[in-house]
Amino acid sequence: MPSAATTTKTRIFHELDFDQPGKQIGYLRVPQSRDGGAWSTIEVPIAVVNGSKGPAVLFTGGVHGDEYEGQIAVSRLARRLDPQALRGKVILMPAVDLPAALAGRRMCPIDARDFNRCLPGDPAGSFCQMLAHFVDSVLLPQVEISVDVHAAGNAMEAALSSTMHWVQDPSVVQRTKALAENFAAPYNVVFWGVDEGGTMASAAERRGVLAISTELGGYGRVSVEGVRVAERGLDNVLKWMGMIEGKPETSPGTRHMEVRDQKGYVFAPSEGLFEPLHLPGAQVRAGQLAGYLHFIEEWARAPVPVEFRSDGHIWMAPGSGRVKKGDVVGVVMQPYSG
Ligand SMILES: [Zn+2]
């Protein structure tokens, strides 16, 4: 037996047959030795639904535990999908980082990692790294499309949107935009991310899988409209791919937007209490006040004004209160320029 340190194969096991007709709802067993549990595993929910021969898609939620819309939409879809009425294969994971989902946190409480920075993962690594390796090496190679449902978590609130990366190949751009238009969130944001490469979307792109993510709410609560957009969007993708009956419901349509570079981001100049002045979707201009940084412990000190650095609409608005120097306290999107 190879030791964990030398293995290149996944250490995660399960009882699913990804090609078996019908619906299987089960768990990935991720080994997690602990005091009092030498052979303990963490059971991460997964379902696979196989209908007649056709395309294959991966729908994920709960990559971040403080983002709830995807957890609700993906688990509900897993329960209601009928293999008799399905063409192709749907793999569903409603709470990818289950320990984070149970804790309502962004970071995994087991290894203190952000799952969405761990791809392509490591079979000999920590909980998130092992799981990321399974998603990258076992699940993504099976599918043509990946939709990873996120929201803005505890720290921010997003204008309801799908998201995609800047990719080089124009035909991939066109197909990804078409996927986003059929998912049909109010906005689709092509964005430059502060920290890319380790994300689900990046991993999907490396595997040649058509991928979008979403930002469907935030402020650490369940967005009523975000859940509605997520559920309709996942159904729409299946309809667009001809996997279930019906035409995608895309009204009133999707506006393509972009965050081209770091100018779209507003960073806190120091630690403090940030008071935002605008809501997601609001139109703003470069030089306009984004908010004030307050210093409650030095109450005689005047709050520091913080300005936007580009024109556009607010994609992400902050709401967490306390911020550290270098935290993002706003992201501005602009109409897509191609
Ligand atoms: Zn997220």
Image (tube, rainbow, N blue to C red):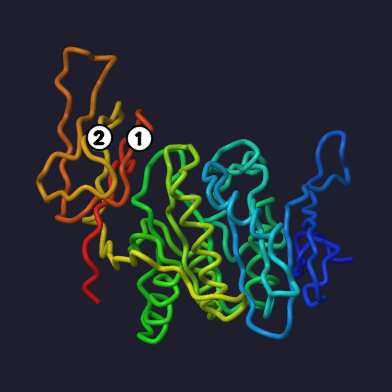
Q: Is mark 1 within 8 Å of ligand 1?
A: no
Quarter of the rendering containing residue 324: top left
Write the residue at 39% across / 71% down: 181
Query: What's under tag 1, amino acid-wise?
Result: Gly
Q: How many marks?
A: 2
Q: Would you call the spot at circle 1 few (<14 residues within 10 Å), some (14-19), or many (20 or more)? A: many
Q: Would you call the spot at circle 2 few (<14 residues within 10 Å), some (14-19), or many (20 or more)? A: some
In percent of width and height, residue 278 lies at 22, 39
Q: Secondary structure at mark 2?
A: strand
Write the residue at 53% across / 66% down: 147
Quadrant, the C terminus? bottom left
Q: Is residue 262 above or below residue 103?
A: below
Residue situated furthest front in the rendering: 246
For the residue pair 74 and 145, the one nearer the viewer reads as: 74
Query: What's under tag 2, amino acid-wise?
Result: Pro
Give the labeled residue for mark 2: 276
Q: Is residue 7 left or right of residue 166?
A: right
Q: Is residue 220 left or right of residue 252?
A: right
CB within 8 Å, label 1 to label 2: yes
Rendered image: mark on residue 10: none
- Distance from the alpha carbon under mark 1 to that under mark 2: 7 Å
Q: Is residue 323 above or below residue 14?
A: above
Q: Secondary structure at mark 1?
A: loop
Sequence-first tag of 1 and 2: 2
In percent of width and height, residue 184 lies at 41, 66
Give the labeled residue for mark 1: 319
Quarter of the rendering containing residue 174: bottom left
For the residue pair 6 and 310, the one nearer the viewer reads as: 310
Write the residue at 81% across / 76% down: 21
Q: Is residue 122 left or right of residue 161?
A: right
In percent of width and height, residue 290 lies at 19, 40
Write the residue at 32% across / 48% down: 316
